[in-house]
């Protein structure tokens, strides 16, 4: 039963993490190679922060890990229950909880871990009772670079993609954006005047100037249409509003996704069900 399942029974013990001092490129490599959405940040064996895909996408010009990360992250102990972990995740909106003993990182429990557990239960509640009603739709010809901006402004991590016939083509999420991103390095320069603005004998055209050149590194998303990214993911995963919580969790687990498009009886988009929504079945 969920209330008797402890965090230590579910947590990942071999945790991928970043260390201070560190860089954005180091984190980006971990996220891509490990296929995860966030990592704890450690310094001198103590937990000091956490950094996620969202942090990287919101701060594309920032390279320093100490600035990118969220300090003093919300944590949980291995003795607490899965229901307590679900309540914390649902109330705070975080997707992962570092598991600590005396501030030493011993594991991590994620929303995905809890969804995997829900898939093994037999929760018969229909998902239509848990849908939050917020859905941002992306046209399949929208450039990926614009999709990133739309999702950031709308504060969503995933959005269904539809064509002009209003047919669901798939779902684009922040994981896809990170996987498609590239690090772009370029040089900028700034001209600084050596003259004084208060010197009436100094003409603008005659001032001595000094050019400063500095390198800039930022994350860039491609301008290709989002339809190209969706095609690589195969046929869209969909369900209907009468699908049970555990069945929805099983589909998420089987397809390694965090959200599913919900269709009506006439096969039109009705909304989205997110992994966060399924936690309500444990907490409410």
Image (cartoon, grey):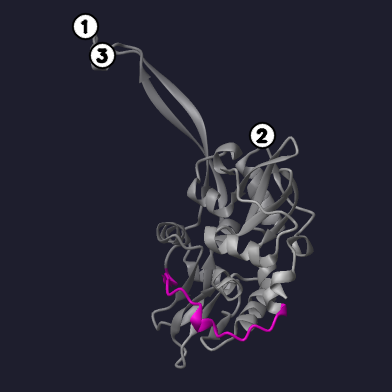
What mark, if any, has residue 144 been given in the picture? none
**Residue at image mark 1:** 201
Question: Who is closer to the viewer here, 111 or 161?
Answer: 111
The kind of secondary structure the magenta stretch mainly shows is: loop
How far apart are the two marked residues, 3 and 1, measured between alpha carbons? 10 Å
Helix, strand or loop under label 2 = loop
Circle 1 crowding by C-alpha within 10 Å: few under 14, some 14–19, many from 20:
few
Could you give the CA–CA distance between mark 1 and mark 2, rounded to whole angstroms? 49 Å
- From the viewer's perspective, tell me whether residue 277 is left or right of residue 142: right
Residue 256 seen anywhere in this rendered image of the structure: yes
According to the image, label 3 marks what residue? 197
> Is residue 42 toward the left or the right of residue 208 in the image?
right
Residue 34 spot, x, y in % from top left: 71, 57
Going 74% across and 70% down the picture, which residue do you hit?
4
Please name the residue shown 47% across and 66% down the image: 225
**Are the residues at dot 3 and dot 1 in contact (C-beta closer than 8 Å)?**
no
What whole-number distance in Å separates the C-alpha atoms at marks 3 and 2?
41 Å
Q: 249 or 166, which lies in front? A: 249
Is residue 111 among what the camera can see? no
Q: In front of the other: label 3 or label 1?
A: 3
**10 Å neighbourhood of mark 3: few (<14), some, or many (≥20)?**
few
Stretch in magenta: 120-141
Find numbered disc 1 in the image and state the secondary structure of the residue it sits on: loop
Q: Which of marks 1 and 2 is nearer the N terminus?
A: 2
Q: Mark 2 points at which residue?
A: 21
């Amino acid at each position: 039963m969920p209330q008797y399942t402890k965090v230590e029974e579910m947590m990942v013990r071999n945790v991928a993490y970043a260390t201070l001092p560190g860089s954005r490129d180091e984190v980006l490599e971990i996220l891509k190679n490990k296929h995860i959405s966030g990592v704890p940040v450690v310094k001198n064996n103590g937990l000091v922060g956490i950094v996620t895909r969202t942090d990287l996408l919101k701060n594309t010009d920032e390279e320093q890990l100490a600035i990118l990360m969220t300090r003093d992250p919300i944590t949980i102990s291995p003795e607490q229950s899965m229901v307590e972990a679900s309540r914390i995740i649902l109330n705070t909106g975080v997707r992962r909880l570092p598991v600590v003993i005396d501030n030493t990182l011993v594991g991590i429990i994620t929303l995905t871990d809890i969804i995997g557990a829900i898939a093994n239960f037999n929760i018969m509640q229909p998902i239509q009772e848990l849908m939050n009603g917020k859905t941002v739709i992306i046209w399949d010809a929208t450039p990926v670079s614009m999709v990133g901006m739309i999702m950031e402004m709308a504060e969503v991590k995933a959005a269904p993609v539809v064509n002009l016939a209003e047919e669901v083509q798939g779902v684009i999420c922040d994981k896809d954006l990170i996987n498609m991103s590239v690090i772009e390095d370029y040089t900028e320069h700034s001209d600084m005047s050596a003259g004084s603005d208060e010197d009436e004998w100094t003409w603008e055209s005659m001032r001595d100037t000094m050019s400063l050149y500095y390198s800039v590194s930022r994350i860039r998303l491609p301008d290709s249409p989002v339809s190209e990214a969706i095609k690589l993911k195969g046929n869209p995963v969909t369900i209907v509003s009468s699908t049970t919580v555990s069945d929805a969790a099983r589909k998420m687990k089987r397809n390694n996704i965090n959200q599913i498009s919900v269709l009506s009886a006439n096969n039109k988009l009705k909304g989205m069900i997110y992994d966060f929504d399924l936690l309500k079945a444990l907490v409410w």
